[in-house]
Amino acid sequence: MDHSTTLSQHVNASREKVWAVISDIPGSARTLSGVKAIQMLSEGPYGEGTRWKETRSMMGREETVVMHVSQSEPPRGTTVKARRGGADYTTRFTLEERDGGTELVLFFGAEVLKPTFFSKLMMAAFGKLGMSVTRKALAKDLAEIAAKAEAL
């Protein structure tokens, strides 16, 4: 049982500038209004294995999730993974040069690892609403990433 969505945002900035924004994990709380706090769990530059705790505000609640970079191909793309509440979450950013700027594509997927009858029932009842809220939050993230990269 999985749910996913893909969004894109044209950014009037080079791929390198967009990459600088999305790979600046310590600075993401200043860039993304939905991120309330970041606690780094690893040292060194952004790359495979980079780990952090991210506290986000969604639907009036704050949740903290441990995240890690599972793939990094600067400045073309990166994949970030997290696990929370019996689900695996994948976020993939892809950066393509286009129309004098960068096309930033974000894929987000959630997969329930061991779906139960109750989790299936809840996803049937609230899955579309949850993905709608998630899409709105991700679109806002993309717009804020674009604004920051364009200001660099």
Image: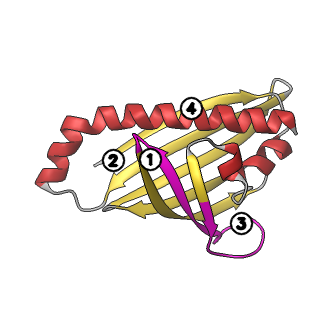
Residue at left 59%, top 67%?
52
Q: What span is in magenta?
A: 38-60
Disc 1: CA contacts within 10 A as few (<14), some (14-19) or many (>=20): some
Identify which amino acid the numbered label 3 is placed on: Gly
80 in relation to 130, above or below = below
* Whether label 1 touches label 4, CB < 8 Å: no
Dot placed on the residue nearer the N-terminal end, 3 or 4: 3
Q: Secondary structure at mark 1?
A: strand
| Residue at numbered disc 1 | 109
Q: Nearer the viewer, residue 145 or 104?
A: 145
| Residue at numbered disc 2 | 2
Between the C-alphas of marks 2 and 3, the distance is 27 Å
| Residue at numbered disc 4 | 139
Identify which amino acid the numbered label 4 is placed on: Ala
| Residue at numbered disc 3 | 47
Dot placed on the residue nearer the N-terminal end, 2 or 1: 2
Identify which amino acid the numbered label 2 is placed on: Asp
Q: Answer with the quarter of the image where residue 97 lies.
A: top right
- Provide residue 10's location: percent of width, then percent of height: 72, 27
Q: Secondary structure at mark 2?
A: strand
Disc 4: CA contacts within 10 A as few (<14), some (14-19) or many (>=20): some
- Could you say which disc has been placed on residue 68 in the image? none
Dot placed on the residue nearer the N-terminal end, 1 or 4: 1
Q: Secondary structure at mark 4?
A: helix
Dot placed on the residue nearer the N-terminal end, 2 or 3: 2
In magenta segment, residue 77: no
